[in-house]
């Protein structure tokens, strides 16, 4: 996967896209030194001040003009003690090569095919292929040649491309442990659509949302390192219905909301945000009433999820071949 140039960030960054990344310069990087001396006053004294002499003495004669610096003679040689020789000028320093930003656009399809790895849990599996159907159809209608990647197949999908990487009941930690093995079996992706976390809050969590966020950020870092040529699009979580998770004595509705709020703050701080890492705010578009069992979105809700993924991808994809 070849290097790509830096990308914008209008949609995701208050700075922008993780381009180049439109992150603000470090505070104090551009510094203007104060002018020494300030405006002060007019230099010298007024015309009525003759240095203390009040008589009519004539002003002093002007000083003789300075002797001109020796110039080249008519013969073209410098008028120096070493007449007839000219000191060669040193070769100028070569202009430094411009620093090329990493990615612009954020995705480069080196083989003309848009390879998408849908990495997640049962929400990635979806209902009859879920959002994968919609992503595929929206992008192919735009003229892209799309290949969905994954070690699993879903015969219930509404499209012919049935590959995916949605592992039912998987958590952040289980995915991090098995991810490299899956990736070794698939073509290197141009885009990773990452949806994880539903199972970390649904039933058996022993951790708080901030702890899960640390695990997720480690997983993202690993993806960025392993797939330096890919765009990693990270989803916020869709909501969950109210139920107390006994292991932490908290309502899973509140924990999912807290996690999403943390992710919206912390992900844009990632050093690759707007270049390699992006956000799809699924949680802002799906309601509890869009879930058929309190956790999983309906097929109709998956169409909205697919649209959110698509809006992000439109910002980071080059024009269709």
Image (cartoon, rainbow, N blue to C red):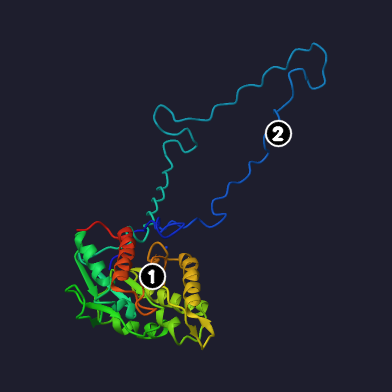
Q: Percent position (x, y) of residue 208?
A: 52, 80
Q: Quadrant of the C terminus?
A: bottom left
Q: Nearer the viewer, residue 84 or 308?
A: 308
**Sequence order check, earlier mark of 2 and 1:** 2
Question: Who's the residue at 47% across and 38% down the image?
Answer: 82
Left or right of 57: which side holds 190? left
User: Where is 293 relative to 86, above or below?
Assistant: below
Query: On the image, numbered disc 2 is attached to which residue?
Result: 40
Quarter of image, res 233: bottom left
Q: Percent position (x, y) of residue 241?
A: 43, 77
Left or right of 243: which side holds 44? right
Query: Badge 2, how many Cα within 10 Å: few under 14, some, many 20+?
Result: few
Query: On the image, numbered disc 1 is attached to which residue?
Result: 234
Q: Nearer the viewer, residue 99 or 172?
A: 172
User: Where is 279 relative to 291, above or below?
Assistant: above
Query: Badge 1, how many Cα within 10 Å: few under 14, some, many 20+?
Result: many
């Amino acid at each position: 996967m070849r290097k790509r140039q830096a990308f914008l960030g209008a949609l995701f960054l208050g700075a922008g896209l993780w381009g180049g990344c439109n992150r603000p310069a470090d505070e104090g990087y551009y510094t203007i030194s104060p002018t020494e001396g300030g405006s002060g006053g007019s230099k010298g004294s007024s015309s009525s001040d003759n240095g203390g002499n009040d008589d009519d003495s004539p002003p002093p004669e002007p000083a003789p003009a300075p002797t001109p610096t020796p110039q080249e003679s008519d013969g073209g040689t410098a008028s120096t003690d070493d007449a007839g020789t000219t000191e060669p000028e040193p070769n100028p320093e070569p202009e430094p090569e411009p620093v090329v930003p990493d990615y612009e656009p954020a995705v480069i399809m080196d083989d003309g095919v848009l390879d998408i790895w849908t990495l997640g849990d049962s929400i990635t599996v979806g209902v009859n292929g879920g959002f994968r159907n919609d992503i595929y159809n929206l992008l192919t209608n735009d003229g892209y040649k799309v290949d969905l990647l994954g070690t699993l197949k879903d015969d219930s999908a509404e499209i012919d491309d049935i590959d995916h990487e949605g592992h039912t009941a998987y958590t952040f930690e289980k995915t991090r442990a098995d991810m490299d093995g899956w990736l070794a079996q698939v073509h290197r992706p141009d885009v990773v659509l990452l949806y994880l976390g539903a199972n970390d809050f649904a039933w058996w969590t022993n951790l708080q949302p901030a702890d899960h966020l640390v695990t997720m950020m480690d997983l993202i870092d690993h993806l960025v390192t392993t797939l330096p040529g890919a765009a990693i699009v990270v989803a916020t979580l869709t909501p969950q219905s109210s139920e107390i998770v006994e292991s932490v004595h908290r309502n899973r509705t509140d924990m999912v909301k807290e996690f999403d709020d943390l992710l919206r703050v912390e992900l844009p701080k990632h050093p690759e945000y707007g270049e390699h890492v992006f956000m799809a705010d699924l949680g802002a578009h799906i309601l509890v009433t869009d879930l058929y069992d309190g956790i999983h979105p309906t097929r109709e809700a998956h169409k909205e999820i697919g649209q959110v993924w698509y809006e992000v991808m439109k910002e980071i994809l080059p024009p269709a071949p």
